Image (cartoon, rainbow, N blue to C red):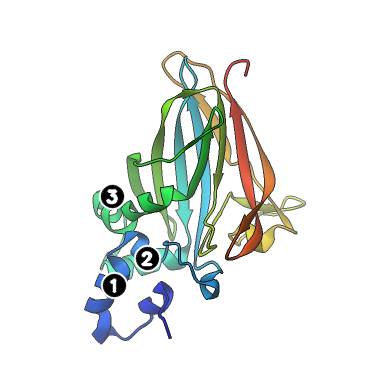
Amino acid sequence: MKETPLRCYKMQHQYKSFLIRLCLGLSLMLAMMVLPLAASAHPHVWITYTLKVVADKQGISKLRFTWLLDAMFTEMVKEDFHLKTIGTKDTNFIKNNAFANLKNYHYYLDIKTDGVAFIPQEVDDFLVNLRGDQLEYTFTVALPKPTQHLELALFDDSFYVDLSPPMQEIGGKDSKSLGSMMVEHHFEPKNFVFVGAESGGTPPTCSQRKTPHTSPIWGTFTVYTLTCNHGKS
């Protein structure tokens, strides 16, 4: 029987040094890796995201993300890295051991700028903090050049990681659960897109819509697609 990363965390302590090399050597300790197994096609890590779309005089220039990870994953990070708490002082350590490998998966971002696919290769301004009992990542993705039209979605095809905007129960009551897949019939997203400007630019206009996405592993599930325009485009 093959071990999933989540099972690795629950193994006996005498195997821990081996498991750390196996399970923690990759970003997010492999818990956030895409696992191409049908048996793994359900979420083990939940991320709630918001973002800010920033424009300068020439167009949309950068995207600023905030990821709030679930409390269970946060506790695993603290336990396996022997951290009593997590703060900005731990940023470089956490980035190198629990985030950097997501470059191989484009940080779960599907981006088009002026109709052309853009695959991010790095992030800037990465910062770690603890919000209550949940780990928070903030980072910036700079676009290759200012764009007039942006399309963006966040998802993991394997559904091993569930990425969702903050949700609220229809009728106004806040959701205490994460994950668009599990709540789509009863919940709707809160506002999760913010806009800004720098260097004398004007903020873009953005809208979001619910769209179906088909994964060869999981089937069809819901993602939230963001569309932004700058100027008259």
Decide which of tag 2 and tag 1 comes sooner along the chain.
1
x then y, percent, for residue 162? 54, 59
Question: Outermost residue toward the left?
Answer: 17
Quarter occupied by residue 134: bottom left
- Kindly identify the residue that appears in the image at 55 percent across and 69 percent down: 41
Pointer 3 residue: 91
Image marks 2 and 1: residues in contact by CB distance under 8 Å: yes
Left or right of residue 139: residue 157: right
In the image, 9 versus 135, the foreground residue is: 9
x then y, percent, for residue 232? 63, 15
In the image, 1 versus 59, the foreground residue is: 1
Label placed on residue 22 = 1
Pointer 2 residue: 30
**Residue type at mark 2?**
Leu
x then y, percent, for residue 51? 51, 39
**Residue type at mark 3?**
Thr
- Kindly identify the residue that appears in the image at 37 percent across and 65 percent down: 30
